[in-house]
Amino acid sequence: MKAKVAINGYGTIGKRVADAVSAQDDMEIVGVVKTKPSFEARIAQEKGYDLYVPAKENIELFKKSKIDVSGTLEELLDKADIVIDATPGDTGEEYKKLYGKHGVKAIWQGGEEHELTGFSFNSEANYHDALGRDFARVVSCNTTGLVRVLYPLDKAYGVRKARVTLMRRAADPNDIKTGPINALIPDPIKLPSHHGPDVNSILPDIDITTMAVKTSTTLMHLHALNIELKKTASEDDIIKIFEERPRIRLVSSKDRIKSTAEAMEFARDMGRPRGDMWENVVWKDSIAINKGELYFFQAIHQESDVVPENVDAIRAMLEIEKDGARSIKKTNKALGI
Ligand code: NAD
């Protein structure tokens, strides 16, 4: 029998997770929750997802727009084994009570604090610790990107310290409300940005400090990493480690991928749904050992890198698959990673 998954918050992340879940043979979407009738609601229905609303008051709005609604969130919860909460950050506490009341497991996203669930998830780093859990949080896009490279480096060579500058996209491509349009904003102005502590919610022993700058782009985040390893490693050693990882895509500027724009074009040319790039894009030719320290650049597609992690988290929490590597392989195969 397939695991029954509900999506509460069908926006940038929610709609992508819904499609990724539908692509798996061991889980299915039982319904998605939309607050307002919109083109996204219509498309969700065209895809065959049953639409639900947060509360009875929302039904009238949908009726006026001639969009059928299958019921309320509470009714959906009674049909689900697990809910993916991809609502905007800070609604967590309120919904946690509701999910608990209906005995449904739940996965939140990076906009919520670690404390909400007491457990933050990354497929490679701590799949095993998620087995059977009721509540978990898949960390943010940036943190997922950082953990994907720091975890294997720490395992193989030991990370003495990591210093990272994150150049963050200011808004998602569909967002017309957020800036800057023509500025760079040190954000926060004083160290550290929240990303370092967030990495520590999964890898508590790594000495990491992060600074972040908001940039006037919507495509991807760009990370500049400087890492001191405990054991000596060559550039080729690092390349080999990254080549073996399931969700790192090595690219090269020699191959004309010199920017986030070309990295996104690459994903579109591969025929990825919505032009998504689920993997970290690491520039192979940026990997440098300089004065004994490792440096490289990576780009992170904020709209999609957490999507396969959500699928793995479902499998772990429902104990459909006990082995993390096997779940990652299965998710990747179904998505075409
Ligand atoms: P979004 O604004 O694109 O989508 C949120 C959806 O939730 C919208 O469809 C909205 O209508 C709906 N919603 C709002 N209030 C609701 C409520 N009370 N009940 C049910 N639905 C409600 O947001 P997003 O970018 O998908 O972000 C969702 C979560 O994922 C946040 O925690 C965010 O921090 C995290 N996240 C976002 C990104 C990103 O780059 N967009 C990346 C990783 C993680």
Image (cartoon, rainbow, N blue to C red):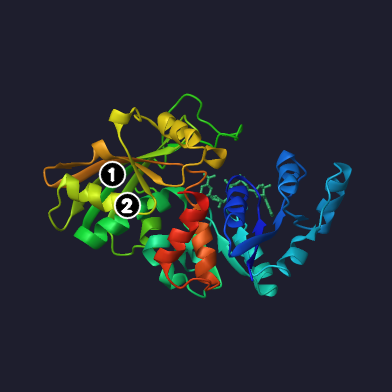
Looking at the picture, how far across and down is residue 327, in whole percent? 46, 64
CA gap, disc 2 to disc 1?
A: 10 Å
Q: Residue at x 58, y 61 (%)?
A: 25
Expressed as whole percent of the image width and height from the top left, the position of residue 134 reads: 56, 73
Q: Relative to residue 227, is residue 165 drawn left or right?
A: right
Seen in the picture, residue 282 relative to 148 is either above or below; the reply is above
Q: Say which quadrant the N terminus sits in.
A: bottom right
Residue lying at 32% horizontally and 30% vertically, measured from the top left: 255
Of badges 2 and 1, nearer the viewer stands: 2
Question: Which badge, 2 or 1, comes first in the chain's sequence?
Answer: 2
Relative image position of residue 108 (x, y in whole percent): 56, 60
- The amino acid type, in three-letter code, at marker 2 is Val
Q: Are marks 2 and 1 in contact (CB under 8 Å)?
A: yes
Q: Give the image quarter of residue 78.
A: bottom right
Characterize the local packing of mark 1: few (<14), some (14-19) or many (20 or more) Cα atoms within 10 angstroms: some
Secondary structure under tag 1 reads: strand
Tell me, yes or no, if residue 116 can be seen here: no
Depth order, front residue of 45/76? 45
In the picture of the structure, the residue carrying the numbered disc 1 is: 225
* Label placed on residue 149: 2
What's the residue type where badge 1 is placed?
Answer: Leu
Can residue 124 be seen from the camera position used here? yes
